[in-house]
Image (tube, grey):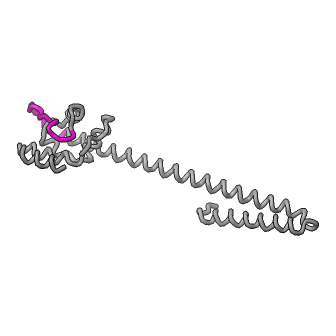
Amino acid sequence: MKLNQNAKEMLAAMALVGAVIVALNAVIAPANARDMFSWSLGLLAVAILVWIWMRRDATAARTDDAAKAAQDAADEAEALAKRREVRRDVQPVASVAPDDLTKIKGIAVGYQRVLNDAGIRTYEALAATSADELRAIFSAASRAAPVGLETIPQQAEFAAKEDWDGLREYQDSI
């Protein structure tokens, strides 16, 4: 039989109150109530066992929730990585010189290497990549996401259009 948390709490409280009542009765009428002391110990034991039972189930529920959250995060990262791989396969291989992605605020040389390894070598490719996809790329490379990750695709759009004044204005506003 599976009881919910409220029922278990009620059962523990009733056993504890019963133990206290029986113990008080034994103290008030000691001559007639020698056997009542064992009842009070029994009810106290029941209260303790129900309390332990509640804690065990609560711990198991937290563990299950954490495992489910970890599995969901892993599934999401895998799905993003697969989408990125498919997109990389679709892009034509061209011998275009890579753009200097470090002109984008938040992308240092190390981040540029990670992006180049993922097939993102131009401003156009970077502009076409969502912030979630970028986060998955950096996560797959065991790198922390750069500061201002959400603004990188928009900055790359300005750079792809060679709108350097617009890029500077946008970078100053963020």
Query: What residue is shown at x 76% (from left), y 67% (from top)?
Result: 18
Query: What residue is shown at x 43% (from left), y 46% (from top)?
Result: 70
Q: Is residue 15 left or right of residue 80?
A: right
Looking at the rendered image, the quarter that the N terminus falls into is bottom right
Q: In the rendered image, which quarter is residue 102 located in?
A: top left
In percent of width and height, residue 9 lies at: 64, 63
Say above or below: 40 vs 97: below
Q: In the rendered image, which quarter is residue 5 located in?
A: bottom right
Q: Magenta region's main secondary structure?
A: loop
Stretch of the chain drawn in magenta: 89-106
In percent of width and height, residue 160 lies at: 9, 43
Q: Is residue 122 left or right of residue 12?
A: left
Check if residue 30 falls in the magenta segment: no
Q: Is residue 24 left or right of residue 93?
A: right
Q: Nearer the viewer, residue 21 or 122?
A: 21
Q: Nearer the viewer, residue 77 or 141?
A: 141
Q: Is residue 123 left or right of residue 10?
A: left
Q: In the rendered image, which quarter is residue 124 located in?
A: top left
In percent of width and height, residue 154 lies at: 16, 48
Q: Name the outermost residue toward the front.
A: 172
Check if residue 102 falls in the magenta segment: yes
In percent of width and height, residue 53 lies at: 65, 55
Query: What residue is shown at x 15% (from left), y 47% (from top)?
Result: 172
Query: What residue is shown at x 47% (from left), y 49% (from top)?
Result: 66
